[in-house]
Image: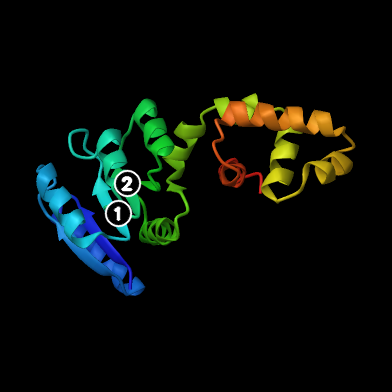
């Protein structure tokens, strides 16, 4: 059974999430006072949830607050809910490892999908925020050849196999990899897969 803490100021959100999560056989704990950061912290420290679902409020769920929760392992994953978020904050949340950001107008099936993916440790960002996160920069800055290399790296192909498949030299493939790493700010091998999925290349 998964354990979730919900921190949102709306009782309707609490009821809605509880009804949706009945399908998942999950234990749902409500942190009712979102405006009190200490109360939210006490709740997650007490319960150490698999997933913290928290409304985005600058004072309560800022990137620095979420980073602290994750670094101290008070929760395995964080799913933020909001109607609006600026691009800078969005990118900060992504970089520090916030697992998901869900639009407040999401339909029940999307909410369930977001929760399922976050519980697995996979990122889920509603399309409105994914479009903002990717913007025009990542997709258009990658050349067609770099996209091809990204796809093959994400599929686990070795540099030599990629070179053979694309009829390139190993040196050229390595150059493309370096460019991809720089453009997408890739920090670990698994992020090749993450970015390929987010760009809908695989």
Residue 48's x, y, as percent? Answer: 25, 59
Residue 177's x, y, as percent? Answer: 70, 33
Q: Decide: marks 2, 1 in contact (CB < 8 A)? A: yes
| Cα distance between the residues tagged 2 and 1 | 6 Å
User: Residue 6's quadrant in the figure?
Assistant: bottom left
Residue 75: numbered disc: 1
Residue topped by disc 2: 70
For the residue carrying disc 2, how many other residues have a C-alpha within 10 Å: few (<14), some (14-19), or many (20+)?
A: some
Please give the count of numbered marks on the rendered protein. Answer: 2
- Seen at 70% across and 51% down, the residue is 155
For residue 78, side relative to residue 133 (left or right): left
Residue 33's x, y, as percent? Answer: 10, 49
Q: Is residue 46 above or below residue 38?
A: below
- Seen at 33% across and 73% down, the residue is 1
Answer whether residue 104 is visible to the viewer in this image.
no
Q: Is residue 43 above or below residue 147?
A: below
- Mark 1 secondary-structure assignment: loop
Q: Nearer the viewer, residue 171 or 131?
A: 171
- Seen at 74% across and 45% down, the residue is 152
Residue 43: numbered disc: none
Residue 117's x, y, as percent? Answer: 45, 58
Q: Which sits earlier in the primary sequence, circle 2 or circle 1?
A: 2
- Seen at 42% across and 62% down, the residue is 116
For residue 108, side relative to residue 169 (left or right): left
């Amino acid at each position: 059974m998964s354990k979730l803490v919900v921190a949102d100021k709306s009782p309707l959100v609490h009821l809605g999430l509880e009804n949706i999560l009945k399908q998942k056989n999950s234990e749902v704990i409500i942190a009712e006072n979102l405006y009190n950061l200490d109360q939210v912290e006490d709740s997650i420290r007490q319960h150490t949830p698999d997933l913290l679902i928290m409304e985005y409020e600058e004072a309560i769920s800022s990137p620095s607050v979420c980073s602290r929760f994750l670094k101290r392992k008070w929760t395995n994953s964080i799913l933020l809910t909001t109607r609006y978020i600026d691009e800078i904050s969005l990118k900060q949340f992504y970089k520090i490892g916030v697992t998901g950001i869900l639009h407040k107008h999401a339909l029940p099936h999307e909410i369930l999908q977001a929760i399922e993916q976050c519980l697995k440790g996979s990122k889920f960002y509603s399309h409105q925020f994914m479009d903002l996160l990717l913007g025009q920069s990542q997709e258009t800055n990658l050349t067609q050849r770099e996209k091809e290399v990204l796809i093959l790296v994400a599929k686990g192909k070795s540099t030599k196999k990629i070179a053979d498949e694309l009829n390139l030299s190993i040196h050229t493939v390595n150059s493309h990899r370096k460019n991809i790493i720089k453009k997408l700010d890739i920090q670990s091998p698994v992020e090749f897969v993450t970015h390929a999925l987010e760009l809908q290349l695989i």
